[in-house]
Image: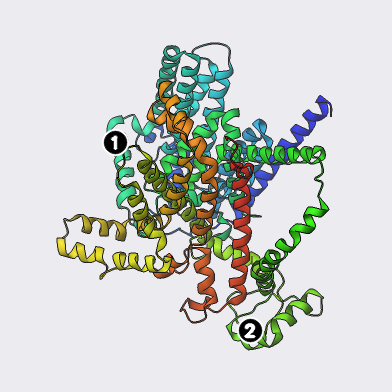
Amino acid sequence: MNKTLRTLFYILSVLLIVALAFGLRTRAVSKLSIDFDEDDYLRAGQEYAHLIRAGNWSGFLEANYRPEHPPLAKIVIGLSILSAPEEPLTPESATSAGPNNYLPRDLVKPARTVNAIIGTITVAIVALLNPLAGLFLAVHTLTIKYVSQIMLEAVPALTSLVAAISYLKGKQAQKSGMNRWFILSAIALGLTAASKYLYCVVGIAILIDWYIDARDKDTLKISLRTAAFWGVLAVAIFFLFDPYLWPNPMARISESIFFHAGYSTSAAEIEDAGFPMWQPIFWLFFSPVVWHKNVFPFPFDPFITILALFGLKRLWHKNRLYVLWLGVAMAFLLVWPTKWPQYIITLTVPLSFAAAEGIFLFRDNILDWWSARKTRAKTHFNKTETRRALPWLIPGLIAFAILTIFPLVFQFGVSMTNFNKASIRDGFNGGIWRSISQGLTGQLPTMPANIETRPDKVNFVGLNLYPGVFSFIAYSNGRSVLFFNVLWTVLSVLLQSGLGLGVALLLWQRGVRLGKFWQALFILPWAIPEMIGAMLWVNIFQKDWGWLYLAAKKFGEESFFAGFVNTLEHSPSMWLIRYLLPAIWYGFPFMMLASSIGLKTISNEVLDSAAIDGASTWQTFRYVTWPILVPLLIPAFIVRGIFSFNQFYLFQAFRFSDSTLATLSYNIFNPSNGFGRYGGQFAVSATINIITVILLMFFVVLFNRWSKAGEGVTYA
C-alpha cells in the first residue's frame, strides 16, 4: 500500500470513528433518562444564560450556582441554551435529592447536545493521534453517558487532553525552555482548572514526566524555570476564566476546598452509597448498560480495561505521560472518599491509549506465534518408548477422564437445560439425557432461559443460560460477584505471598535460633482443616458474642478492640479485613515453604560476591535473591491463586453467601439454604461452574505466558 492510499485509509478511519462517536453520543442525548446533578447544572446554565441575555456582565462576579465547582463548564451550558426559549429557573434541591424528571426538554436537549459535540471533538483528537485509541474512547459507554448529559465532564475532558498533547509537542520541539506548545498546554490546564478541579491530575502527571525527562537529560535547572513559568501561566488562565473568584479569591477558593472536604466525609448520599476504597477499580470494569436498556450497543468498558492492563508496559516505553496520567488519576480516585462513577472520565483518554497498545501486543504475539509455528521443527516420537509408557499412562488417563473430564462434560450438559429442584424427579428419570440428546439433534425446540422460573419438566435451553448468568455474576444487585472474586484473589495472594516470603527471609538469616521449630510452628495453620480454621476465626469476628466483640465490651470504648470493631462495622473498605486475616493466616505457610525451598538453592558464594561488590541488603535482594526465587515461586502463586479464586469454606462459615463464584454456585445449587428465589437452580449452578473453569483456564494461561513459568528454572 503506497503512501497516498495509507493516508486516505487513515483519514477515512478517523472520519468513521468520529461519525460513530457522534452517533452514539446523540443517541444517548435523546435516550438517557435524567440523572443526578443534571438539574443543578442546568440551573447554573440558566443563570448564566439570563445574565448574557440581559447583558449583565458584572453578574458573572457573583453567579456560580454550586460554587464547589468552577464556572467555565457551567457557562458553556448557559451558552448552549441561549437559542432556546427562557424557562423558569429550575428549583433548587439538596445534593442528596434524586433526579428531577421534570426538567424542560427544550433546555435539556441543547445542553446535552453541546456536551456531546465536545465529547466527539475529544474522540476526534484522540483518533488523529491513534485511530484505535479513538475507537475505544468512542465506544466507552461510561464516557458516552457522562459527556452526553448536563454534566461538567465534557469540557475538562477535552481541555485536559489538549494540555497533555500540547506538552508532548513541546517536548519534541528543538527550542529549549518555554515554547508555543508549552504555552498552549498551560492555557489548556488553566481552562481545565476553571471547569472542574479534579481533571487537573493531568497537570501532576505532566510535572512528574517533566522531572523524569529533565533528570535523564541533566537539564533540571532549565526545566525547573520552564515548569515554574508554565505553572504560573496556568494559574493566571484559571483565574482569568473564573470571574467568580475575582471579588474575593482566597475566601471563595477556601469555600470550595472546605466544601469538598466536608462533603466527601459527611454527605448523606456518600454514606448511603457506602462505596469502598476500590470502587473506582470496579467502575473501570462496569458499564452503564445495566442502568439504561437500549441506549448502548454493547458493554465495551470491561474489555477496554483488560486490554489496557496488557498495554500499559508498551505504552510506558512509547509515551510515558499517558501511563503517569492514568496512574495519578487512579491513585487520587482511590484515596478520595467520593467515588462517583463520572470521576472515571478523568482517565478514560489514557485508558484508551493503553487499550490500543494492548491490541498491538496481542497482534505481535499472534504474529510471533505464527512465525515460530512455521519454523518450529516437528517433534519425532519414538514408537518403542511410547509403547513402554502406555501402560503407565493409561490408568492416569482413565482416572483423569472419570474424575475430571466426565464431570465437566456432565455439568456442561446440565447447563444447557433448565434443571431445577421442581424438575428433579423428571431429571433423575431420564429427563436430563432426554432434553440434551433431543435438543442437540433438533427433536426438541430450544426454550428461552429464565433463572427465576422453575418448570417441573427438564427443557433444553442450549446456551441461553450463559448470557443471563454472566450478567448475574457480573452486575447483580448493584455489585459484581466476579469483580469481588478477582479482587479477593489478587489481594489474598499478594498478602499471603508477602508474609510468607518475609517469614522465610527472616528464618533464612544467619544466626536465627530454633529455625526448624519456628518453621514447624508457622506451618500449623496450613495443617488445620480449612473449615475448622474458618470456624476459629468466626468465633473471633462473630458479632456480639465473638472474642473481639467481647473484648471490646470488657475493655471499653476507648480500647483498641472497640476501635477495631468500629472500623469493621462502619468503614466501607475495612470490613474486608475480617476475611483477609483468616485467608492470610491459612495461606502464608504454603508460600513460606515455597520461599524457603528457593532460598536454600542460593549458594553463600553468590551472596558473598554481592557483598564484596558493595551491594546493599535491598540491592542483594532485588538483583540476586529475587531473580532466583521467581521461577520457583510462580507455580506457588498459581496454586494459591486457584485456591483463593475458589475460596469456599471461609465465606460459607461467615455466611457471605455470594462472595465468590464457588460460594454463589453452591448456594444457588442448594435448595434448602434460604438463598431466596434462586435456591435449587441446578442448571444455573452448573453454568457458574463452567464459567469458573473457563475463567481459571484463561487466567492461568495468561499468567503462565506473562511470567514464562513454562520455561522452568533457567538460571542454573
Q: CA distance from mark 2 to mark 1?
A: 63 Å
- Given contact means CB atoms under 8 Å apart, are the residues at marks 2 and 1 in contact? no
Quick one: 190 or 77, which is closer to the camera?
190
Left or right relative to 310: residue 282: left
Occupied quadrant, residue 530: bottom left
Relative image position of residue 232 (x, y in whole percent): 40, 21
Q: Amino acid at mark 2?
A: Pro
**Quarter of the image with the N terminus in it:** top right
The residue shown at (45%, 36%) is 328
Q: Amino acid at mark 1?
A: Ser
Label 2 or label 1, whichever lies nearer to me, is 2
**Quarter of the image with the C terminus in it:** top right
- The vertical placement of 187 against 539, above or below, is above
Quick one: 300 or 493, which is closer to the camera?
493
- The vertical placement of 468 against 353, above or below, is below
The residue shown at (50%, 73%) is 667
- Dot 2 surroundings within 10 Å: few (below 14), some, or many (20 or more)? few
Whether residue 608 is visible, yes or no, is: yes
Mark 2 element type:
loop
- The vertical placement of 526 against 192, above or below, is below
Report the residue marked by disc 1.
254
Report the residue marked by disc 2.
455
Relative image position of residue 464 (x, y in whole percent): 68, 69
Occupied quadrant, residue 696: bottom right
The residue shown at (52%, 40%) is 630
